Image: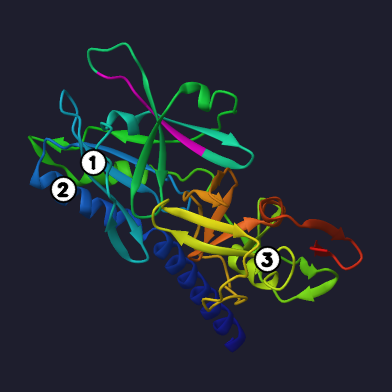
Amino acid sequence: MKKIISAAAAAVMTCVICISSVSAAESWREAFVTRLMKIMSSDPSYNEVVITDLDRNGIPEAFVMRGGMNGGISAGFTMNGNTITSIDIPANIIGECLTDITVYEKEGRYIFVGREVPRYSSVINYYKLIFDGQKLTTEKILKSYVSPYPTIPYVDMHGDDFLTNGYPNRIKIKNFVDRYEGINPLTATNSNAKLLVNGEEADVFGYSVNDSNYYKVRDIAMILRNTASRFEVAWDENLNGISISTGFKYTIVGGELSDDGAALNVSQNSAPVYVDGEEMDFLSYNINGNTYFKIRDIADMVGFSVDWNSELQAVNLITK
C-alpha cells in the first residue's frame, strides 16, 4: 500500500511540475492581455493588434495600431523573463505594414518583409523588418530583393474586434491572444563535435542549430589569436554592427571559452557584420546573449581551412 501511495504521490508531483513548466512557458499570454487592456483603455482609437515573432525566440511581439487614415503604431512590447518590455517603434511605416508579413528563406535565414499600400497611390512599398530584442527597424526594399527566395508558412496574427460599446473587452482580447501559435521557433542543442586547431584540441563550447555547428565568434578569435589567421572582434558604434578586422591579434575582454550551458534564449542575429569594413551576408544567432557563427563562415571571413576528422568526430581548423 505504501508503494502505491508513494507512486501516486510521485505521479501527482510529476504532473504538478509539468503544469508549472507549461504555465511558466505560457506566462506571456496573461501579461499580454493585461498590457493590451491598459493600452486600449487609455486610447480606444488604437484598437488593432498584431502578434508576431520576428526574432523567432518563442515569445512573440505585440504591436498596437490605429486603422483608417492615421494608421500609426501606438505601442509595441514583448516579454523578457517575467517582465513586459517596450519595443522602440519606427516612424517610417504605418501599422498596415505589420498586418501583411511574408517570410522568405535564404540559406537558413528568415527574412521578414512587410507590405504596405499607401493611400491614394498604386505603388506598393516593401519593408524588411528587423527586431533585435529591443528595437524594431525597417529598411525599404524592392520586391526583387527577396523574389529569388522561397516563402515559408508563417502566421502573423492580426485582429481588430476588441471593443464593446467603445471599451476594451478583456474576454475578446484573451481569446485573440490564446489563439496565437508560434511558427518555427529556433532551438539550439549542445554540439558534440570537438574542435581542433592544426590538429590540437581546443576547449571551445558550441551549439548545433539546424544540424550545423555554431561557435561564439570571440571564442574562435581567442583560439586563433597566436596564429596566422588571427582577427579582432569589436562592436562598431558608427556602423551599429559587429566589426571583424583580419590580421590583428584579438583583444581579450573576459568570458572567452566559457560554457554558456543550455540554450535558453535563441534568436536570429539582426546586427550587420563587417569584415575589414565590408558588410558581409552571413547567418548568425544570438544565443544566451552571445553571437554565434557557423565555423565555415568564420573561415571564409578571416581565411583558414576547415576539415572534418571522422575518426575523432572533430572539426579541424587549419591556419598553416
Task: From the image, tell me which residue sits under label 3.
Answer: 230
Q: For the residue carrying disc 1, how many other residues have a C-alpha within 10 Å: few (<14), some (14-19), or many (20+)?
A: many
Task: From the image, tell me which residue sits under label 1.
Answer: 64
Q: Quadrant of the N terminus?
A: bottom right
Query: Are circles 2 and 1 on residues that touch, CB within 8 Å?
Result: yes
Q: For the residue carrying disc 2, how many other residues have a C-alpha within 10 Å: few (<14), some (14-19), or many (20+)?
A: some
Q: Which disc, if any, is residue 39?
A: 2
Q: Is residue 112 magenta?
A: yes
Disc 3/disc 2 C-alpha distance (Å): 51 Å
Amino acid type of the residue tagged 1 in the rendering: Val
Left or right, 57 with respect to 170, comes to right
Q: Residue at x 86, y 70 (%)?
A: 199
Disc 2/disc 1 C-alpha distance (Å): 8 Å
- At mark 2, the secondary structure is helix
Q: On screen, 266 above or below 148?
A: below
Q: Which residues are magenta?
A: 111-118
